[in-house]
Image (cartoon, rainbow, N blue to C red):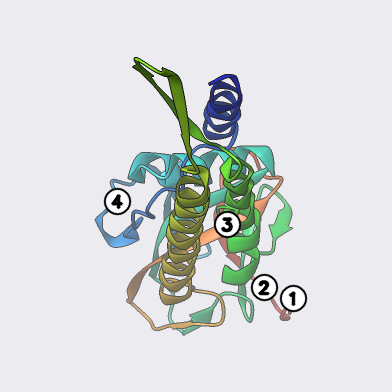
Amino acid sequence: MKNCLNYLIIGAFSITLFGCASVYKPIEPQYQNYMAHELTDGISLSYKYDVLQDAGNKKNAKKEDKNGVRVIAVKITNNTDSTICIGKNAAFYSGYNQLVPLSPKAIKEQVGQSPASHLLYLLLMPMNLYTTKQSDTGTETKSYPIGLIVGPGIALGNLVVASNSNSNMEIELIKNDIVGRDIQKGETIYGIVAFKGVGYLPLSIKKIKTSPL
């Protein structure tokens, strides 16, 4: 019984430390309520921080804070007389500092869940459940290797959920990637961008003469 209790303690500690994997909930930038607005060089930018947290992706939001990344939903309207393209003739700015958005793959690496961390649940494999039965001839103790089912079951389940969550997040990021996309005169588009080290600074989009890429 003592060994069983020890492994239960290890299991409880692992769950507390690493938690369970969570399903990714989409940001859907086209449905966001934008409160911040900026108009520069005829380009209207509305944006919203903390969209991962607001969507219910708490694990991703924690990694966002930990790694100094900000994932942002944006709405861009081209009020100029020509086509604009982020990364070609227009760029994001914070004050006078030009910002380079992270790629969808880089965003996933920075704020995605860690599937491999759930393999630590395999530490539960040696766990046994002991039962004791009293009889006229004495005490009979039996052991059941429940850890062989519980450990791999929890590890595999969480690994699959975390991997699928990361894949679904990357799919949404790629779908809403606005870098290199032409925005026609009078057109409004929605997207998701991310920057490292910007905090919650005001953002704008300005025209540039040459491509930063």
Residue 85's x, y, as percent? 54, 80
Residue 124's x, y, as percent? 58, 41
Mark in the foreground, 4 or 2: 4
Mark in the foreground, 2 or 1: 1
Q: In 3D space, how far apart are the residues under numbered discs 3 and 4 (Cα atoms)?
A: 29 Å
- Residue bearing the label numbered 1: 212
- The amino acid type of the residue labelled 1 equals Pro
Secondary structure under the numbered disc 1 in the rendered image = loop
Q: Quadrant of the C terminus?
A: bottom right
- Residue bearing the label numbered 3: 115
**Foreground pick, 170 / 167:** 167
Q: In 3D space, how far apart are the residues under numbered discs 1 and 4 (Cα atoms)?
A: 29 Å
Secondary structure under the numbered disc 4 in the rendered image = loop
Give the mark nearer the N terminus: 1 vs 3.
3
Mark 2 crowd level (few <14, some 14–19, many ≥20, 10 Å Cα): some
Q: Is residue 17 above or below residue 99?
A: above
For the point 44% across and 46% down, the residue is 52
Residue 169 circle label: none
- Residue bearing the label numbered 4: 32
Residue extending farthest left: 31
- The amino acid type of the residue labelled 2 equals Ile
- Residue bearing the label numbered 2: 208
Q: In 3D space, how far apart are the residues under numbered discs 1 and 3 (Cα atoms)?
A: 34 Å
- Is 34 left, or right, of 71 in this rendering? left
**Foreground pick, 9 / 195:** 9
Mark 4 crowd level (few <14, some 14–19, many ≥20, 10 Å Cα): some
Q: In 3D space, how far apart are the residues under numbered discs 2 and 3 (Cα atoms)?
A: 40 Å
Q: Is residue 69 above or below residue 77?
A: above
